[in-house]
């Protein structure tokens, strides 16, 4: 087992304990203080590890946020086609945030998707606008894994 997979699995196994010990915190505060963020060295099998973890997890509702089409193509190619995973680009959330004064339907839909997810994987969080990262942290009730890729 690769170290990146071990680290992620350890956090996932301890997540419920962290969450229950800090249930008085808002989602935003919890994910900022007890959240998971890992910058992987180039060459580490991040996508393969995430695919394996997603296939083994008991979490039914998984969301993957990606920074670009090439990253989407790469991560989705590793995932099991039979697994129900929702994908969206962080730019979609940013656009929905900018349009909220005109139409709130899309931001509500995205926030609902994040809120009901058991596991949210945010790839390229360092490339996202800070307000997008904060919106994700505030919306996720379940486990959030941040991977700040360049």
Image: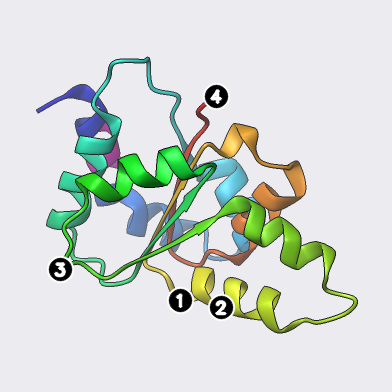
Marks 3 and 1 in Cβ contact (< 8 Å):
no
Estimate how packed mark 4 is, as few (under 14), some (14 to 19) or many (20 or more) residues with alpha carbons within 10 Å: few
**Mark 4–mark 2 distance (CA, rounded to whole Å):** 28 Å
> Residue placed at 90% from the left, 76% from the top?
101
Quarter of the image for residue 136 reads bottom right
Q: Secondary structure at mark 1?
A: helix
Estimate how packed mark 3 is, as few (under 14), some (14 to 19) or many (20 or more) residues with alpha carbons within 10 Å: few
Marks 2 and 1 in Cβ contact (< 8 Å):
yes
- Nearer-N-terminus badge (3/1): 3
Q: Which residue is mark 1?
A: 116
Estimate how packed mark 1 is, as few (under 14), some (14 to 19) or many (20 or more) residues with alpha carbons within 10 Å: some
Looking at the image, which is closer to me, 42 or 115?
42
- Nearer-N-terminus badge (1/4): 1
Marks 2 and 3 in Cβ contact (< 8 Å):
no
Instruction: Give above or below for 49 relative to 31.
Output: above
Q: Secondary structure at mark 4?
A: loop
Looking at the image, which is closer to me, 1 or 14?
1
Q: Nearer the viewer, mark 2 or mark 3?
A: 3
Q: Which residue is mark 2?
A: 112
Instruction: Give above or below for 32 relative to 40.
Output: below
Rendered location of residue 1, percent (x, y): 9, 28
Marks 3 and 4 in Cβ contact (< 8 Å):
no
Q: Nearer the viewer, mark 3 or mark 1?
A: 3
Query: In the rendered structure, which segment of residues is drawn in magenta?
Result: 7-11
Q: Nearer the viewer, mark 1 or mark 4?
A: 4
Instruction: Report the side of 106 relative to 5 (left or right).
Output: right
Q: Which mark is residue 82?
A: 3
Quarter of the image for residue 102 reads bottom right
- Nearer-N-terminus badge (3/4): 3
Q: Which mark is residue 150?
A: 4
């Amino acid at each position: 087992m690769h170290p990146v997979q071990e680290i992620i699995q350890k956090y996932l196994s301890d997540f419920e304990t962290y969450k229950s010990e800090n249930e008085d915190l808002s989602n935003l505060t919890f994910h900022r203080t007890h959240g998971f963020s890992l910058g992987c060295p180039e060459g580490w099998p991040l996508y393969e590890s995430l695919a394996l973890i997603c296939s083994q997890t008991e979490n039914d509702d998984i969301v993957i946020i990606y920074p670009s089409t090439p990253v989407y193509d790469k991560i989705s190619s590793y995932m099991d086609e039979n697994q129900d995973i929702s994908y969206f680009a962080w730019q979609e959330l940013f656009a929905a945030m900018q349009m909220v004064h005109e139409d709130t339907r899309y931001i509500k839909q995205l926030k609902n998707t994040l809120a009901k997810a058991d596991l949210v994987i945010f790839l390229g969080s360092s490339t996202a606008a800070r307000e997008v990262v904060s919106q994700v942290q505030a919306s996720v009730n379940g486990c959030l894994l941040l991977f700040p890729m360049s």
